Amino acid sequence: MTSSLAAVDARLSINQGTLKHADLATALQVTADAGIRSIGLWREPVQEVGLATAASMLADSGLRFSTHCRSGFFTMPEGPARRASIADNLRAIDEAATLAAAGAPGSSAVLVLVAGGLPEGSRDLVGARELVRDAIGELAPDAAAAGVTLALEPLHPMYATDRCVVSTLGQALDIAADFDPSVVGVTVDTFHVFWDPDVYDSIERAGREARIATYQVCDWKTPLPADVLLGRHYPGDGVIDLARLTRAVVDTGYTGDVEVEIFNADIWSAAPAEVARRTAETFAASVSPHL
């Protein structure tokens, strides 16, 4: 291993969403070649090759598995669509367990959940969050049996109506509180929580309640693109106080991998190997000093 690869932070994981246009084989290869030791996978590339094949590829790569992204989307009222969503989430639990077992030692069986937006025709955010709680209640026994932690992710409130009715870490923790922390935890994603005036109190609470299942980092800067989903940037390229947020997470006792998850059209259009290299470089400068 060269000195540059040896310098890559051992806790860095690259979320496959950062390598959006790379197939699974390419994502695994460029991650390993960059000296990054862990990867968070997305369901679609895994399903493209089949779960058994994906697990074998992951095992052969020698990489740890940090999270499986993503499932959830269960804010619809009772009916066929909700039943289909629950069934799909059960499949995702099985995927996460299988991939974690295939990953290198230190892998984590964590399934990231995005709640879903307001039901069609509804203005009831509180009621929609109760639908999320009910869905997690259905999934929790299967997750516990599989050894999988469901990591509920709050998203920035600009996504509240169409993507995620859970907008703050506090709201996510309130839902998780009904369940064992080994089964239901939370995702702390800097892009989504940095703005929250209560974020540091909520991080402390999450640590006290043993709820931090995964920590994801990227950066924010304005103006946002027309598609605000694609406004994520390399760590250090924006205005998020990654130093303070990272120290707050570390101070809770969190010792797991730290994922870089970036949705950005320009980054997605770059060569995957260059994206992996830049991810490691920016993480080392902006996050590693605070771990």
Image (cartoon, grey):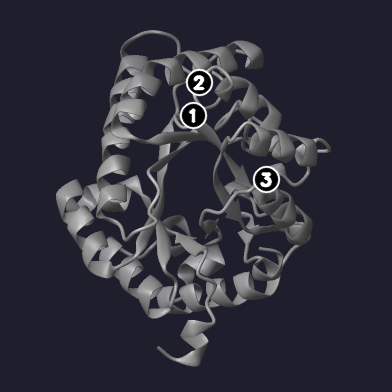
Q: Which of marks 1 and 3 is nearer the N terminus?
A: 1
Residue at 56%, 24% in the rendered image: 176
Residue at 47%, 13% in the rendered image: 134
Q: Is residue 99 left or right of residue 213?
A: left
* Circle 1/circle 3 CB separation < 8 Å: no
Label ID, residue 252: 3
Give, as a three-letter code, the residue at label 2: Phe
Q: Nearer the viewer, residue 206 or 51?
A: 206
Answer whether residue 88 is visible to the viewer in this image.
yes
Label 3: state its secondary structure.
loop
* Circle 1/circle 2 CB separation < 8 Å: yes
Label ID, residue 179: 2
Cα distance between the residues tagged 2 and 3? 20 Å
Label 1: state its secondary structure.
strand
Residue at 18%, 58% in the rendered image: 56
* Vertical side of 69 occupied by 172: above or below: above
Say few, some or many: other residues with alpha carbon within 10 Å of mark 1 (under 14 / 14 to 19 / 20 or more).
many
Say few, some or many: other residues with alpha carbon within 10 Å of mark 3 (under 14 / 14 to 19 / 20 or more).
some
**Percent from the top left, x then y, of residue 27?**
35, 67
Q: Name the residue under label 1.
A: 184
* Vertical side of 28 occupied by 246: above or below: above
Question: Furthest residue to the right?
Answer: 197
Give, as a three-letter code, the residue at label 1: Val
Cα distance between the residues tagged 1 and 2? 6 Å
Image quadrant holding the N terminus, namely bottom left
Name the front one of labels 1 and 3: 3
Count of numbered circles on the image: 3
